[in-house]
Amino acid sequence: MENKRVTIVGAIVFVELLFLAFLFLGKKPEFLQVGNMLSPLLSLAAFTAIFRVYSKFEKGSMQRRVWLFLALGMLCWFIGEMESLYYAATSASIRVASVFSIGEIAWLAGYVFFSAALFFQLRYFTEAVSRKGGIVEAGVNSLKESGPAAAIAMVGSLLIAVLVIGFMLVPINNSAMIFEQKLMLFAYLLGDFILIVMSLLLLSLLVGGELEAPFGLLAGALTIAGLTDVTITTALLANSYIPGGALDFFSLLVYVALMASGEIMRQKLVAAENRSER
């Protein structure tokens, strides 16, 4: 227990120091180069961890489909990171070449795959309480049991929708941007909103269960990804300062959390297999 406590506290301190480093040093050229290199590497590592979980499930199973969509979403975001790295290395701007570049399409496709994965997982978990024995079904709360948490998630989602529409969608529509730019921002905001809402609902079903850790990390990572994009869009609309170093930190944190989610889930599946063989 003491070792676990030391590990958790040490990890929190490390994350805090890393955040401050990105916040205060994020605009230095040498630090930017390190950050630009880390994003593709960590996104690739996250894809690998998620794909390994996908390969552990039987063909045709719902969980295999869920983790396939997660892997495809992560692969799309890796492609987006590679394009960003290319433009950073060539000192060019993605927006100059094309509003809908390959990278932008990949980012949006990633949102679609992640949203599909969360949808299928939510549908599966709402039905899982009638099943017994599997690790995926263990400790999943019913809708009745998670009622208060689910209600808070829905109310929070409604408030988020009101804020997004009032402070973002209307200003975007009234801005001087070209139609393609408005369409792209609308698509990003829709993807952000879906990820945030579905992640909250997913957590309401899993807190206290066997899968609290892996899916908690997954939901938390996708929520941070959505909020980070909302922050960028808000700053662009207000023509205000974008804290690039801090946002880069949160982007890397998303990939680390997704990678940890996949690895924890894989270890749980391996442990379940070992128990069944005894």
Image: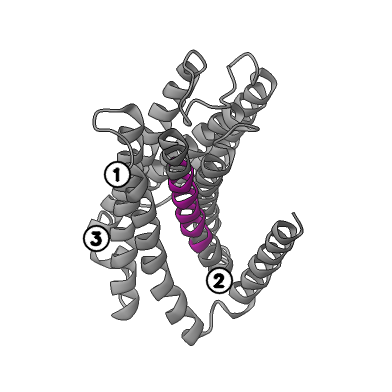
Q: Helix or strand or loop: what does disc 3 sit on?
A: loop
x, y percent for residue 72: 29, 46
Circle 1 packing at 10 Å, graded few (<14), some (14-19), many (20+), is: few
Mark drawn on residue 245: 2
Q: Residue furthest right?
A: 2
The reply to whether residue 91 is in sight is no
Q: Helix or strand or loop: what does disc 2 sit on?
A: helix
x, y percent for residue 101: 24, 58
Give the mark toward the camera: 2 or 3.
2
Residue under the image location 62 percent in, 23 percent down: 150
> What are the residue bounds of the magenta stretch?
252-269
Residue assigned mark 1: 55
Circle 2 packing at 10 Å, graded few (<14), some (14-19), many (20+), is: many
Mark drawn on residue 204: none
Q: Helix or strand or loop: what does disc 1 sit on?
A: loop
CA distance separating discs 2 and 3: 25 Å
> Nearest the camera: 271 or 98?
271
